[in-house]
Amino acid sequence: MATTSVFNGTNLILKIETVTLGHTTSCSLTLSNDLPEATTKNSNGFQEVIAGVISGEISFEGLVDYSDSANAIEMADYLLARTQLTCVFGTAETGDAVYTAEGFLSSLEQSAEMESPVSYSGSITLTGSITKSTN
């Protein structure tokens, strides 16, 4: 009988330029595959597609703590300088999948609501190949 373990989101880490992004509250990796149509007369009326261009995006949210090594101010500096970043998305658990890619920050927002903690959010559009490894 196979054992199943639930993956806890608090174990997920996002490293940007080898430094873990501080105080993240959520993070997601979105992978997409463009599927150009390849339907022909021989398709018997059914749509056929081929695998095309693969793309990816990492989105993140967190709480601002300026003492973190990687924080909202540093992310803003990367965006303003148009810096290409090395991103690592995964966990530190042995055997878990880890995805690594280069990318550019496509958006960054810092938000401060009255009597609430200051938060930040952003997204990184991945460029080039996306590799998978295990810890």
Image (cartoon, rainbow, N blue to C red):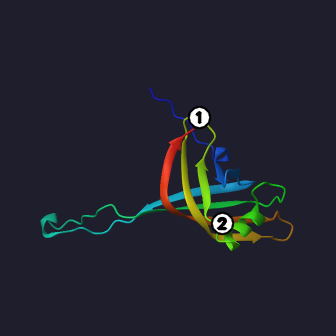
Q: Position of residue 55 (x, y in %)?
A: 46, 63
Q: Residues within 10 Å of mark 2 (few under 14, many from 20)?
A: some
Q: Nearer the viewer, residue 130 or 41?
A: 130
Observer-nearest residue: 9 or 81?
Answer: 81
Quadrant (top left/top right/bottom left/bottom right) for the N terminus: top left
Q: Is residue 16 left or right of residue 48?
A: right
**Badge 1: how crowded within 10 Å, few (<14), some, or many (20+)?**
few
Left or right, 60 with respect to 127, comes to right
**Whole-percent x, y for residue 23 in the image:** 75, 54
**Callout 1 amino acid:** Thr
Image location of residue 105, percent across then percent down: 63, 67
Which residue corresponds to the image point at 83% horizontal and 60% vertical from the top-left? Answer: 66
Instruction: Point out the image quarter for the C terminus.
Output: top right
Assign a secondary structure to mark 1. loop
Q: Residue furthest top?
A: 1
Residue at which label 1 appears: 94
Q: Is residue 42 left or right of 10 when viewed as pictured?
A: left
Which residue is denoted by mark 2 in the rendering?
122
Identity, as a three-letter code, of the amino acid under mark 2: Gly
The secondary element bearing badge 2 is classed as strand
